[in-house]
């Protein structure tokens, strides 16, 4: 704004002089402009002598302004900044016009010029006053170092062009002009040195302007160069310069907040390079720089640089996946893996939050692979498998090292408000139409998710947090509702997930039996939700329903034979499992005869049926408790079961729909089924 006003003042002053000159010329040839005739009727005889004081004052002002600007730029930052100021056309033009006006008026005084020269001298005087205002405006603009950097950046951006960067050659190969690249590097280093100085002097606006300028210059450079360019001396040198900027930000405790802006800029440049280059060598250097800054930031406690480093590495990875650049993905994933090892090794809340963020990036990468498969029909299965393997290893290492509270952070990142299953569902929902080949590939990728769940749930299962059970219901819901594959493939995924879930149930129950502890109540509640999904979604296909449900009574029988006489606690655990099976039978009874389609479940329920002891309290018991169904949490309401809320299904009406369908009217189905078992 100030620069614009200065330019307007300059053009106004020139206009005043030109009008006066034109008026005089017209007067000399006999054409008189009546409106200006008063200027030449009675001019002062000593006008030029009187203007000398004004001229000397203005020259003094110009001298003071020039010295001030030079001193301000040189003392605070670099002598090259003052040189930039005096390369500004308008700034130099203002000084030149003032000097011309001064010489003209001095000459008029010496030669005792009269009319019509007094008119021109008068115009020069008015113009000089206007130019003084412009000079002050320019001074106000350039006194701010951030404005000088912005001015330099605009000049560099205007100068970057394909014809400037590449020199002509006989072979038609794009070879960069080393002289031009050297000059571009030199100009950019001025911004870098100013940025470092601003960090040292705690000048936040200057730092932000410098970093933004460097990012803009890289964007323009990438836009004007070939995506196959292998000669990247400019980007390599800039990468080195950013190492010095990062070092300056971490050199002192009070400067650590600047590291956030530095990391964000490096990440933005890395993403831009990944988008605009076929070869990943350049982007890998910026990924390496992000990893180094992550490690440097761990010594400080008032900066989000570590989290931003992870986020930017994730963005670079997703960009490479979307572009199909597998080589770059592997490099970026390697950097994330190094960071993951650091975060999962120490039991600290800060490291746990960083690892949660990193696992979020892994989830985004997997979702990007799904989106790429559905969009272009291809996703490298080996890379997906490698990603999930690294993800699982990181998760399991942290699970073994973290305390209960830190594990809660870890699991919340996977199954919390924005769960892994939800990210996958979003990618699946964006493209529901796929050909048979793509469907097979999608089935294979989702099968790897089941393997991932198996790995993280069954490895050191005694260290599991209860949120792991919620994850199985989330993925079952996605498999049932959002996977665009043929029914046979979908059933294969669901069956595989169901088998893994049963394996986890078995492992958890055995651990509880052998340690004589109560089974986690969260597991039993999630068993209810999981089997409810199976029954509801397959209620119209009794054959499939039987295949999915029959393994549950089989597991119950195996555990009963092995642990039924092992003590009161184990008997209570088995009774809880029996109650779950009884509720499963009551739900099936809503749609089919369980005795016919799930005979093994029916036989178990009949053989182990027990009478419910009468209550001695005068207070009526809840229906579920009175008839021997699961109780003891919000999942089991007074008159039936209630699907626990989750962001995947709570806002769609599904929660009420499945609950009402399985419970029936007033819970009478539970009573009828209990009485049927009692009579059998």
Image (cartoon, rainbow, N blue to C red):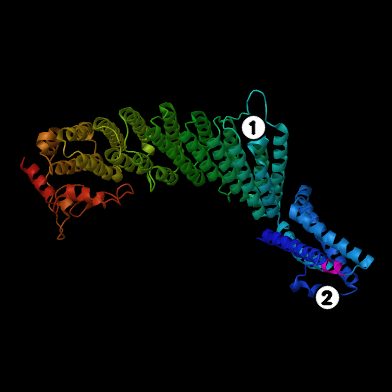
Q: Residue at x 36, y 37 (%)?
A: 462
Quarter of the figure with residue 45:
bottom right
Q: Please name whichever residue, 379 or 35, is drawn nearer the observer in this view of the structure.
A: 35
**Residue sticking out furthest to the top:** 171
Within the magenta stretch, is there residue 119?
A: yes
Our reading of the magenta stretch's main secondary structure is helix
**Residue sticking out furthest to the front:** 30
Within the magenta stretch, is there residue 402?
A: no
Q: Looking at the picture, how far across and down is residue 174, in whole percent?
A: 63, 28
Q: Quadrant of the N terminus?
A: bottom right
Q: Looking at the picture, how far across and down is residue 311, in whole percent?
A: 51, 43
Q: Please name whichever residue, 75 or 472, is drawn nearer the observer in this view of the structure.
A: 75
Side of 313 where 147 appears, left or right: right
Answer yes or no: is residue 568 visible: no
Q: CA distance from mark 2 to mark 1?
A: 70 Å
Q: Quadrant of the C terminus?
A: top left
Q: Please name whichever residue, 633 or 147, is drawn nearer the observer in this view of the structure.
A: 147
Side of 384 where 638 appears, left or right: left
Asked if residue 361 is positioned above or below residue 64 in the image, the reply reads: above
Mark 1 is surrounded, within 10 Å at the Cα level, by few (under 14), some (14 to 19) or many (20 or more) other residues, namely few
Q: Looking at the picture, how far across and down is residue 249, in whole percent?
A: 65, 47
Residue of label 1: 232
Instruction: Tell me which numbered mark, 2 or 1, is placed earlier along the sequence.
Output: 2
Asked if residue 401 is positioned above or below residue 116 in the image, the reply reads: above
Q: Looking at the picture, how far across and down is residue 532, in whole percent?
A: 22, 43
Answer yes or no: is residue 375 visible: yes
Label disc, if present, on residue 41 of the rendered structure: 2
Q: Magenta segment range? A: 115-120
Disc 2 vs disc 1: which is toward the camera?
2
Q: Residue at x 80, y 55 (%)?
A: 71
Q: Secondary structure at mark 2?
A: helix
Q: Secondary structure at mark 1?
A: loop
């Amino acid at each position: 704004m100030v620069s614009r006003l200065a330019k307007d003042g300059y053009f106004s002053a020139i206009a005043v002089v030109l009008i006066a000159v034109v008026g005089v010329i017209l007067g000399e040839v006999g054409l008189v402009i009546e409106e200006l005739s008063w200027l030449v009727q009675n001019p002062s005889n000593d006008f030029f002598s009187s203007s000398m004081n004004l001229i000397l004052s203005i020259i003094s002002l110009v001298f003071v302004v020039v010295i001030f600007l030079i001193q301000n730029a040189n003392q605070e930052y670099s002598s090259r900044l003052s040189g930039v100021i005096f390369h500004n056309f308008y700034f130099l033009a203002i000084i030149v016009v003032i000097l011309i006006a001064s010489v003209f008026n001095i000459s008029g005084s010496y030669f005792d010029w009269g009319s019509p020269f007094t008119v021109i001298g008068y115009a020069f005087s008015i113009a000089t006053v206007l130019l003084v205002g412009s000079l002050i405006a320019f001074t106000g603009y350039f006194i701010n170092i951030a404005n000088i950097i912005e001015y330099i950046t605009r000049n560099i951006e205007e100068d970057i062009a394909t014809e400037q960067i590449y020199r002509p050659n006989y072979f038609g190969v794009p070879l960069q002009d080393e002289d031009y690249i050297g000059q571009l590097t030199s100009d950019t280093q001025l911004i870098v040195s100013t940025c470092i100085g601003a960090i040292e002097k705690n000048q936040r606006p200057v730092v932000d302007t410098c970093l933004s300028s460097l990012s803009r210059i890289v964007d323009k450079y990438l836009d004007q160069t070939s995506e196959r360019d292998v000669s990247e001396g400019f980007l390599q040198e800039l990468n080195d310069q950013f190492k010095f900027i990062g070092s300056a930000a971490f050199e002192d405790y009070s400067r650590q907040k600047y590291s956030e802006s530095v990391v964000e800029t490096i990440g933005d440049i890395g993403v831009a390079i990944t988008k605009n280059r076929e070869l990943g060598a350049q982007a890998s250097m910026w990924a390496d720089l992000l990893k180094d800054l992550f490690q440097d930031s761990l010594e400080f406690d008032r900066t989000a640089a570590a989290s931003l480093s992870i986020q930017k590495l994730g963005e670079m990875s997703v960009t490479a996946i979307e572009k199909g650049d597998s080589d770059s993905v592997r490099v970026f994933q390697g950097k994330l893996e190094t960071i993951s090892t650091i975060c999962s090794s120490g039991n600290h809340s800060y490291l746990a939050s960083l690892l949660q963020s990193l696992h979020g990036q892994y989830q985004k990468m997997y979702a990007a692979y799904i989106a790429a498969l559905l969009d272009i029909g291809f996703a490298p299965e080996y890379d997906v498998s490698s990603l999930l393997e690294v993800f699982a290893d990181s998760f399991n290492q942290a699970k073994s090292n973290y305390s209960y509270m830190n594990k809660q952070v870890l699991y919340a990142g996977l199954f919390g408000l924005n769960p892994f299953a939800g990210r996958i569902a979003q990618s699946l929902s964006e493209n529901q139409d796929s050909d048979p080949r793509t469907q097979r590939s999608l089935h294979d990728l989702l099968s790897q998710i089941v393997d991932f769940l198996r790995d993280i749930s069954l490895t050191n299962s005694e260290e599991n947090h209860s949120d792991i059970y919620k994850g199985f219901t989330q993925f079952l819901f996605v498999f049932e509702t959002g996977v665009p594959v043929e029914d046979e493939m979908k059933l294969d995924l669901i069956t595989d997930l169901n088998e893994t879930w049963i394996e986890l149930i078995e492992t958890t129950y055995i651990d509880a039996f052998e340690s004589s502890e109560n089974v986690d109540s969260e597991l039993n509640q999630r068993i209810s939700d999981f089997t409810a999904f199976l029954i509801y979604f397959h209620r119209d296909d009794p054959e499939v329903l039987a295949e999915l449900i029959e393994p549950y009574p089989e597991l119950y029988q195996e555990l009963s034979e092995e642990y039924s006489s092992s003590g009161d606690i184990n008997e209570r655990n088995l009774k809880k499992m029996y109650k779950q099976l009884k509720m499963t039978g009551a739900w099936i009874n809503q749609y089919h005869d369980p005795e016919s389609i799930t005979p093994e479940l029916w036989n178990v329920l009949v053989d182990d049926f027990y009478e419910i002891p009468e209550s001695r309290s005068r207070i009526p018991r809840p229906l579920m408790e009175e008839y021997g169904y699961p109780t003891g949490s919000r999942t089991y309401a007074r008159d039936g079961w209630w699907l626990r809320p989750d962001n995947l299904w709570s806002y769609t009406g599904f929660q009420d729909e499945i609950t009402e369908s399985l419970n029936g009217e007033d819970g009478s189905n539970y009573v009828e089924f209990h009485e049927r078992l009692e009579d059998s």
